[in-house]
């Protein structure tokens, strides 16, 4: 299944750094997301987007993950040549990721 | 109980929801956050052209509609619409008040302009050369915090206009002022800042930027209500919106906004406090009411972030569409032709296939679309050279593959923004009070 079937996400930008939240609709799915959606898996899925490292932060208090992706916005909003200069649409790219459920 | 409303989350935000808040939410404060990263550099350019300019271009329109409601309902306004010129913005607000026959006091908060104080021969964040080498520098503004805003709140000002301050500080300042929190009570400051972080993007927490198919349905988006918080003296807040407005506030919308533009959630750096999101507890306590408690914090950093605006040259763009059988193949052929014609002038030439892979930079093996729009973009320091991109795209009409249509070309002067740091002791906020009655 795709992540979009069990989780939602919002993208944010700071300079050339992209952050992607990943929030399960059902809190019981949080542990499974922690297990399946590793930083390495995210970097591999978004290899055309993320040029730098991916760091994953876990928030068990609100049952959410936050992926911080370095060198991912073609320089950042003000001088990027990308169509989507903020990378706002990239939350949908994360949710296209396939996982075994 | 303190009630703070969010009446704008970016400079182009809708105005009507702020009117709805002022009429129905029994607010103490309304905040209008209108300043994006690049806005202040653009405003600085306007200030150079016109000394009385340099504030938010929509200030007049917003203030004309909101000022009567603010003053009649005794709601104080905090806004960063001052942009590059808070004093000129304050004068403009007074002029509007006089025209509408209201008397009021306006405070302008200045001190964020640190262009004379930053070291242009230092390397910025994420940079690989000196600040001065990026291009001619236009502006440098420090993100000030509540220290800059509190003196204005302690004055009799009805309207407080700032330039660059950290967005959530606009919401934290009235909490600290109202409840008299100590500047060392880091947990309360952290919790208060989280409430501000949740509110600062207006409807992004009340169902805006959220709707997606059956799993994320949002009622009556056309009439979306903006959020406000009801806050206790210990910082506990309830995020809600005016009854009868469209939109939605639940755990899902609050969680999405909680992590918006956040990196390490245990160390979110602000001018006022280093915030800890990892202890926050959220609870749906009623329809469209989410309780936020237990945010934490520790001492603020010794440096402030500075945004530096510079001339980044000219962005040249061109687009043309292909449709039907072989559409993608024809767009790809056009791309090859353009590379041959343009790569010498634009080594970083960007080519996108709109409809296929232009926003995600991949299509994850998706199906080939019926129509494709070729988009070509590149930077150059010369406007004339930058315009070559659009000209070559347009020239594909006669000199490219079959049946290309709808060519468009554009050249935009570009302002880039770099980030650097400044010792907070070097930043000296000041306030100016202007009043209709005093005639100052």
Image: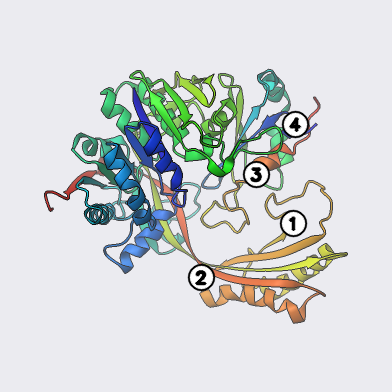
Please report, as a chain letter, where disc 1 is located: B
Q: Secondary structure at mark 3?
A: helix
Quadrant the N terminus of chain A occupies = top right
User: Compared with residue B61, is residue B78 higher up or lower down, i.e. above or below?
Assistant: above
Q: Is B8 or A10 nearer to us in this picture?
A: B8
Gap between marks 4 and 1 measured at Cα: 23 Å
Dot 1: few (<14), some (14–19), or many (≥20) neighbours within 10 Å? some
Whether callout 1 and callout 2 share a subunit is answered: yes
Q: Tell which residue pokes out farthest to the left in this image.
A: B438
Q: Which mark is residue B415?
A: none
Q: Mark number for residue A90?
A: 3
User: Relative to residue B71, is residue B306 drawn left or right?
Assistant: right
- Tag 1 and tag 2, C-beta contact below 8 Å: no
Residue B381 numbered tag: 2
* Residue found at the far right of this picture: B325
Check contact, mark 4 vs mark 1: CB within 8 A.
no
User: SS class of the residue under badge 4?
Assistant: helix
Mark 1 or mark 2, earlier in chain: 1
Q: Nearer the viewer, mark 2 or mark 3?
A: 3
Q: Which residue is mark 1?
A: B355
Residue B400 in view of the camera: yes
Q: Residues within 10 Å of mark 4 (few under 14, many from 20)?
A: few
């Amino acid at each position: 299944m795709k992540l979009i079937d069990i989780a939602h996400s919002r993208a944010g930008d700071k300079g050339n750094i992209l952050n992607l939240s990943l929030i399960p609709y059902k809190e019981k799915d949080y542990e499974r997301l922690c297990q399946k959606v590793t930083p390495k898996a995210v970097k591999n899925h978004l290899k055309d987007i993320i040029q730098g490292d991916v760091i994953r932060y876990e928030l068990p208090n609100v049952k959410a993950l936050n992926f911080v992706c370095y060198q991912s916005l073609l320089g950042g909003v003000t001088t990027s040549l990308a169509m989507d200069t903020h990378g706002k649409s990239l939350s949908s790219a994360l949710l296209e990721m396939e996982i075994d459920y | 109980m303190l009630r703070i409303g969010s009446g704008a989350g970016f400079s182009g935000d809708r105005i009507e929801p702020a009117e709805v808040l002022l009429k129905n939410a029994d607010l103490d404060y309304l905040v209008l956050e209108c300043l994006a990263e690049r806005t202040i550099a653009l405003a600085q350019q306007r200030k150079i052209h016109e000394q009385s300019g340099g504030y938010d271009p929509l200030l007049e329109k917003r203030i004309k509609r909101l000022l009567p409601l603010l003053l009649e309902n005794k709601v104080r306004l905090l806004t960063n619409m001052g942009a590059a010129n808070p004093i000129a913005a304050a004068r403009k607000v007074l002029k509007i008040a006089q025209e509408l026959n209201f008397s009021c006091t306006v405070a302008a908060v200045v001190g964020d302009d640190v262009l004379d104080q930053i070291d242009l021969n230092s390397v910025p964040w994420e940079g690989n050369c000196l600040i001065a080498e990026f291009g001619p520098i236009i502006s440098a503004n420090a993100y000030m915090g509540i220290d800059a805003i509190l003196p204005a709140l302690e004055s009799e000002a009805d309207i407080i206009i700032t330039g660059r301050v950290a967005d959530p500080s606009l919401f934290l300042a009235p909490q600290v002022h109202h409840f008299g929190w100590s500047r060392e009570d880091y947990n309360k400051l952290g919790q208060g800042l989280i409430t501000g972080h949740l509110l600062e993007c207006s409807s992004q927490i009340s169902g805006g930027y959220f709707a997606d198919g059956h799993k994320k349905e949002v009622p009556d988006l056309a009439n979306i209500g903006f959020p406000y918080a009801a806050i206790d003296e210990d910082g506990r807040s309830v995020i809600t919106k005016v009854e009868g407005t469209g939109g939605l506030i639940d755990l899902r919308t609050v969680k999405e906004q909680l992590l918006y533009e956040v990196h390490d959630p245990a160390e979110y750096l602000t001018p006022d406090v280093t915030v800890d999101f990892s202890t926050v507890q959220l609870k749906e306590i009623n329809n469209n009411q989410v309780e936020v408690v237990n945010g934490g914090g520790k001492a603020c950093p010794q440096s402030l972030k500075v945004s530096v605006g510079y001339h980044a040259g000219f962005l040249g763009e061109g687009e043309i569409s292909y449709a039907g059988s072989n559409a993608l193949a024809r767009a790809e052929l056009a791309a090859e032709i353009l590379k041959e014609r343009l790569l010498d002038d634009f080594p970083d030439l960007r080519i996108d296939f709109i409809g296929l892979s232009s926003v995600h930079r991949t299509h994850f093996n998706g199906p080939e679309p019926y129509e494709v729009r070729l988009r070509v973009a590149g930077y150059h320091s010369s406007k004339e050279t930058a315009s070559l991109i659009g000209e070559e795209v347009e020239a594909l009409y006669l000199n490219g593959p079959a049946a290309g249509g709808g060519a468009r070309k554009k050249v935009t002067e570009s302002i880039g923004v770099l980030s650097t740091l400044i010792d907070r002791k070097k930043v000296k906020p000041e306030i100016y009070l202007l009043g209709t009655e005093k005639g100052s």
